[in-house]
Image (cartoon, helix red, strand yellow):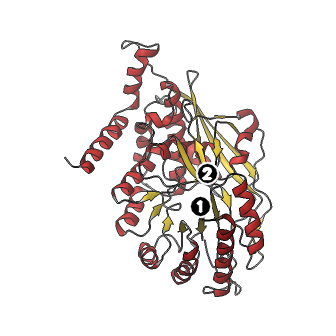
Amino acid sequence: MSNTEQRTGRRHFVMGALAAGIGSCTVARGQTRESSPRTPFNPKITEIKTYKFNVPTGKPRVDPGTGKLISSAFKTWLFLKIETNTDLYGWGEASIEWLSPVVEKTIQGWRELLVGRNPLDVVAICDDITDRLPWKGGPILGSAIAAINMALYDITGKAWKVPVYQVLGGRKRDRIKVYNGSLNFESVEKARAIARAAVDAGARGLKGNPLEARIWPMDQRVVEHCTNVVAGVREEVGPNVQILLDTHGSPTPALAILFARMVAPYRPLFLEEPCKVGDVAAMKEIARQSPVPIATGEKLFTARAFKEVIDARACAFLQPDVSHSFGLNHFLKIAHMAEEAQMLMAPHNAGGPVHFASLLHVDAVISNFLVQEVWNIERHSQYVDHDFEFDRGYVALNDRPGLGIDVNENHIAKLPYKSSMAYREYRNADGSWKGW
């Protein structure tokens, strides 16, 4: 048997055990705890609760090319709590920009499909919900299922008294490489200063959004400016700090290729979403011509969509978002497909601490992990009790049961929710749409 066949066999065994019902494994563990074969541990879901609230991000963002508002000074987070008839409960997160209210209604509409079920039947419950739906994809369904999947795994880990990464098969690393610094493209001088401050504070990866100031589709002035910024930052931070560039799917393929060729000497780790998502052929052509590795995936949700990108070899790095792509199990399916194609995973994260905790657990168990995006980590302790230990570009794993966090429920229940976040508006000088 080949090494690939052995790995595949082990993977199918683990996933098969999960699919067969995590509750059966819990009985075995229960025998060593308090239960016996005659009295299996059989908790039931009694209630689901959702919490939707705003989190400050700083000043509103303005399009540097047109001066129009593109986002407000806050984001909306959506947390889910699943309660049981025992002292066990679990937390999930379905935060998704501009769509959180719709996702919340979706989760609440599934209450009757959850109450009364054994929360340890993680895969069975999530499959039962998705099997009832004629629509199988999209960010709303993907985010709603993801929150439920996270919360059920949180409960299962607590029931077993182990971290979720052990429920998923065991960790392959004891710390997770992250990038959490920012790149600023206003000026070379400001970019260098912000990059230096981030690195001095411990960051080893810096990410920013080049090309946003362009005012027409082939604005070479902006390409040259952004290249100069990256060159200045590379000179400032040296060769061992990663530079990551995210164009949000807004450039044309021609502009993305031009920029990639100009910025390549400064060795960015990747160029993320270099064209609009959905055209795999265009992405493949960019990947073929770009000297900078291409990353994509935050706007894809199903394994089928990722498989199309993988089969076309339309990128080097995949970026699924565990809060939108149907949760931990589906994320691992995507990671395993990528592994067979020798592609690495650089998961997307624009959410909160429950989302981040879930990412740490799936990052720990996959073989083809590259680096993890982190957002607003310095604010996480305001909302959850956690042991996220950030040290020189890594976050250490801990052995707390479940997802390893506990939400400050009393605090988030009092936080305001405001629905007036501005939709992004990227426009060229002539008023035509330029991105997103």
What is the tally of numbered marks visible in this picture?
2
Observer-side mark, 1 or 2, equals: 1
Residue 270 in the image: above or below residue 418: below
Q: In front: 116, or 254?
A: 254
Q: Is residue 326 above or below residue 273?
A: above
Which residue reaches farthest right? 59
Identity, as a three-letter code, of the amino acid under mark 1? Asn
Residue 340: quarter of image: bottom left
Residue matched to label 2: 393
Tell me residue 21's x, y (percent): 37, 32
Mark 1 surroundings: few (<14), some (14-19) or many (≥20) residues within 10 A: few
Query: Would residue 93 be visible to someone looking at this image?
Result: no
Left or right: 34 in relation to 384: left
Camera sees residue 422 = yes
Residue designated by label 1: 240
Asked if the residue under mark 2 is in contact with the one under mark 1, i.e. CB atoms within 8 Å, the reply is no
Name which residue type carries label 2: Gly
Q: Quick check: 123 left or right of 207?
A: left
- The quarter in which the C terminus is drawn is bottom right
Residue 412 position in % (x across, y down): 73, 39
Residue 262 x %, y %: 57, 81
Between the C-alphas of marks 1 and 2, the distance is 11 Å
Residue at the (48%, 69%) spot, across then down: 293
| Horizontal side, residue 179 vs residue 339: left or right | right
Of callouts 1 and 2, which one flags the residue occurring earlier in the amino acid sequence?
1
Q: Residue at x 49, y 53 (%)?
A: 325
Expressed as whole percent of the image width and height from the top left, the position of residue 196 reads 73, 61
Disc 1 element: loop
The kind of secondary structure element at disc 2 is loop
Vertical relation: 138 (above or below) 260: above
Which quadrant would residue 213 be assigned to in this image? bottom right
